[in-house]
Amino acid sequence: MKKAIALVSLTAAIAASSQAGAVQITLACGTVGQELQLCKDGAARWAKKTGNTVKVFESPNLTNDRLGLYQQQLAAKSDAIDVYQLDIIWPGLLSQHFVDLKSKIPAAEVNAHFKGIIAADTVDGKLVAMPWFTDAGLLYYRTDLMKKYGYNAAPKTWAELATMAKKIQDGEKKTSSTFTGFVFQGKNYEGLTCDALEWLVSFGGGTVVDDSGKITVNNANAAKAMDTAASWVKSISPAGVTTYGEEEARGIFQSGNAAFMRNWPYAWALGQSDDSKVKGKIGVAPLPSGGNGAAATLGGWNLGVSMYSKNQAAAIDLVRYLTGADEQKVRAIEGAYNPTRPALYKDQAILKANPFFGSLLDVFTSAVARPSGPTKLKYNQVSQAFAGAVSDVMAGKSKGAAAVKKLETDLARIKGRGW
Amino acid sequence: MTTNAPTQPPTAPPMGRKKKVRGIEGARAWQAFWLLLPTLIAIALVAGFPLYRTIFFSAQEANLTTPDQATFIGFQNFWFTTAEGIGLGFMQDPQWWTAVRNTLIFTVFSVALETVFGMIIALVVNSAFAGRSFLRTAMLVPWAIPTVVSAQMWAYMYNDSFGLIGQGVLGGQALLADSGTAIWAMIAVDVWKTTSFMALLILAGLQSLPGDMYEAADMDGASKWTQFWRMTLPLLRPALLVALVFRSLDALRVFDIMYVMLGANVAASTSMTGYARQQLIDNQLLGTGSAVSVAIFIIIMAIVVIYVTAFRVKFD
């Protein structure tokens, strides 16, 4: 009996002390590739350091699904999630629900990140989120197959890519019936907006909506870019490419069934892992040009603290820890997640793990932003209309010229009385 | 209704305290009312209030993240043309009409196929043979799997590079990539999933048919075929119609198959609910999304009314 009482009071004491000192923070992490594991590891390191606990909330894989879920939480002013992982296109959309970090984090720490990303995270002077990792579209290729078919450099133009992919595909198909030349994100969703924006910009077709909010997509170069992409389907890309997201494309490339792949930097570390069939055979290059230079879409994720969090101080500390140099370095080495701090691109350990980081620094720093800034709250509709138009062209339902004309009308309808 | 009960004595005193005067039926009516009251309140809370909110927001310009800042705009969510000639109402959006058309195709074909297959299965498991009870249970398995799970499972099977159907049977054809074939792929999934439910409803109807009637028909020399067309089908009609109404309503409200297998953007032009979700969630247009929901509600109501009046369905 005495024992029982002692046990009860001891448990109560522990419960009370843990409630007074440490808090539990809920962190919403993405789940693409290694993301979740790295997120959990980082959170665990912070928890160990501070004595708090972190509960990791697993978000849906596709960014559109994630946004819907977050908005419901935020509109309900729910305190269930303290720290949100925010896509680079969301700050304008969600700014009112997040703590202004400008006054909470020293300026020197904020300024250590890429200026462009900080600008994208700032809405009406309010710093909505801190950059966690950045992203830009890259071209992955099989170095072994390039050599086998007599190529010694990555394709510089889309036409070159098509020729090379065709030759390799025709050769490899003899031994492997499911082999394909080029995989990318062709599914009708936000990922296609990213890929298609790269095609448009590289052909000199503009960014759909320009910085002043003018709809610019109805032009010959944009139409040509779409037609070029459509010509890949069923020739150098499988018919099913119009149903592939990031992970489907990576699955095919990583199992050795594709010569080229367009994807984000995260695919590098996974492709070099032990269970990868293409380990040691992957090359990375800037995406090809359509005549107007190479273009990569700016992606990346940021961490913001919910206004409805009950433990804001601890949540901000977690954000500072995760976006700090040490944590970004770990993520860069283990997962090839691009740091948002320029200083880290000179770090030897990072360059050893990701040899292409140094040479592709330009790609990361000059990546093209999606028109989420000028279109504000209506960005999602714009992106859907754009992805839908590209998808129609790729499915053969429409030609580039007709598609950009219709898209212009659709965008005008979405714009309505203004963005 | 029952307040003017005929048992009321003709010498009823003029208005005033009258409770007792209503007689036993009046008292019962009141008792029934009080007993029903909790249920009525529950219905008002769980069904009435959300419906009211949806109708309310359908006439507002409102954003999902700031529903408290809604402004009244009447029917502009449905139909509105700006001075520049730009149509802003969702009914001016071609994508909505594509979604309506696809949903109707989906409903007509999936329900028709489910009814035919369901009928065949029900007739088979209704006849006596060994292992019948096992079959009756086993056939419900596809229906018991949550739709999101079965939809994802089918999406993998349809995959053109590793799918059992896409790669194995069709040799790398991507069914889901082309909207022309995707709708049939969706119908196949729905038929696979829901036929057993249809069979169960029809089986329940079959079980209520009197067995001696068939014995008599056998004696009279009617063929099995005649028995089916002249006896089973007419007698099964009420059960069949209720099943048809249920399935049609479900099919018109289909959401998860499209959403899981095609993704949010394509689902929005394949099912009406997908379109509503896209407006409401992805685009944060609480007003437009609610207006679309109201439109779906009206379409489904209209179809039910047509069903019930045209076929004189009785639900009791």
Image (spheres, grey):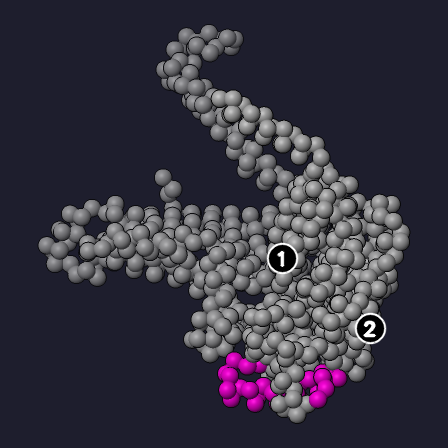
- Local crowd at mark 1 within 10 Å, few (<14), some, or many (≥20)? some
Residue in the picture at 69% in, 46% down: A47
> Does B168 appear above or below B222?
below
- Reading the image, the residue beneath label 2 is A362
Q: Please, what is the three-letter code of the amino acid marked with disc 1? A: Gln
Of the image marks 1 and 2, the number of the one nearer the N terminus: 1
Q: Please, what is the three-letter code of the amino acid marked with disc 2? A: Asp
- Reading the image, the residue beneath label 1 is A37
> Does B73 appear above or below A272?
above
Quadrant of residue A275 within the rendered picture: bottom right
Q: Residue furthest front?
A: A3
Left or right placement of residue B140 versus residue A306 in this view: left
Left or right placement of residue B230 versus residue A400 in this view: left
Residue A267 numbered tag: none
Q: Residue furthest left?
A: B219
Left or right placement of residue B193 versus residue A120 in this view: left
Residue B233 x, y percent position in the rendering = 28, 54
Query: Disc 1 on helix, strand or loop?
Result: helix
The chain ID associated with circle 2 is A
Residue A127 x, y percent position in the rendering = 83, 51
Q: How many marks?
A: 2
Does residue A410 show up? no
Q: Nearer the viewer, residue A40 or B68?
A: A40
Does residue A181 show up? yes
Q: CA distance from mark 1 to mark 2?
A: 29 Å
Residue A216 x, y percent position in the rendering = 81, 70
Residue in the picture at 75% in, 77% down: A286
Q: Nearer the viewer, residue B117 or A345?
A: A345
